[in-house]
Image (cartoon, grey):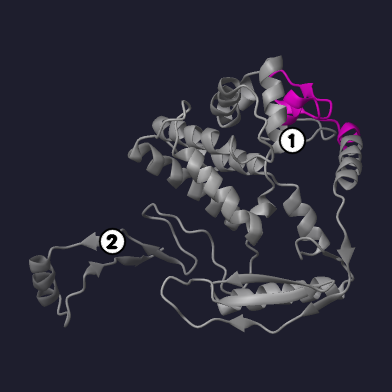
Amino acid sequence: MPHPRYLIRLESTFDTWRVLGTAPECIKLPNGQLRVRRAALDAWLAARVQVAEAKLNVGFSHDVQFWKLAHLPKKKGRKRSHGVRWVVAGKLFSKWLEYDAQADSFRSLLIQVARKGEGFDTATGLPESLAREQQAITWFDLACRFVDLKWARSAGKTRRGIADALATVTSAMVTTSRVPEPKTLRAVLYRWAFHTAHREAITLDAEQAAALAWVCDNSVKVVKLEEKDQRAGIIRHALDTLALTMDGRPAAATTVARKRAVFYGALNYAVELSRKPGPGAGAPRCRRGGAPTTDGILRLPVLRLPAARRSHFAEQHGLHQPARHWMGRVAA
């Protein structure tokens, strides 16, 4: 049993910090696990807080005004029709959600934070706590978390597909056009960063560590994807990169579709991480059959029947109108 002076667990991103030399001093146990003394951890956290505060050069204001909820008319293809609008230092900000309860919950959260005396970021419009939290997350960190989320339940071929797609798109989700040697960068991302087992067992050489440090320093902040003037350009550049091979030639249609699905999955995961619990905000949906939902019902996969069999099925079970899809529901 570990000594109480040591931490019990370390996060997966700790391996990246060790490679970059920014992790606290570790002790390796005989079973291969790592532990950190509490004194070393406290000193490391204090130093990281000072560095973060020095880098986070943003202004905060207490001049905040909140508007009533906005409701757009229902339209085909429009999902987010309920908006929260507020003004920070004379600049208007808005956030549009799918349900009225979600919008009301988010507006109440902003009002409660303002009443506590917390300042609002003049660049993003978010409270200081949320702004600092979001600006600390980069696309590279998000991609690593997404890989760790999918790793345990994915087959080997699926893992390779996820790593391949994220390695391609991550090289485009950066803030500079000066990229290290492409083959070295891809090898670091594909074989180490987006491989959960290798991050814990393999040590990078100097060239690979330099490429990894470049990705960590220049990766796009996730909060940039919420800014209207930058979101379209970043995502379009990423999609264009997915459509090309390493040689610059057009990739196969099936390859592009597979990589786009992984990219969209990572973006949806970012939305799940930023979603706050509240009325109307359910848990993330699971596409695999047999997963319980928030209402305590176990929904079975859809059974699609031909037209002739639908009619016979309806008559046999006493249904008045034959439905196109039949959804089985049993208590969880």
Q: Which mark is residue 324?
A: none
Judging by the rendered image, the residue that carries numbered circle 2 is: 302
Q: Quadrant of the C terminus?
A: bottom left
- Residue 14: x %, y % from top left: 72, 32
- Whichever of callouts 2 and 1 sits on the residue coming sooner in the sequence is 1
Q: Magenta stretch: give its range.
A: 16-41
Number of other residues with Cα within 10 Å of mark 1, as a class: few under 14, some 14 to 19, many 20 or more: few
Q: Quadrant of the N terminus?
A: top right
Q: Amino acid at mark 1?
A: Asp
Q: Which type of secondary structure does the marked residue at label 2 adopt?
A: loop
- Residue 83: x %, y % from top left: 62, 76
Cβ–Cβ under 8 Å for marks 2 and 1 = no
Nearer to the camera, 281 or 143: 143
Residue drawn at 71 percent across, 22 percent down: 210
Nearer to the camera, 173 or 69: 173
Q: Do we see residue 204 in this rendering?
A: no
Judging by the rendered image, the residue that carries numbered circle 1 is: 217
Number of numbered callouts drawn: 2
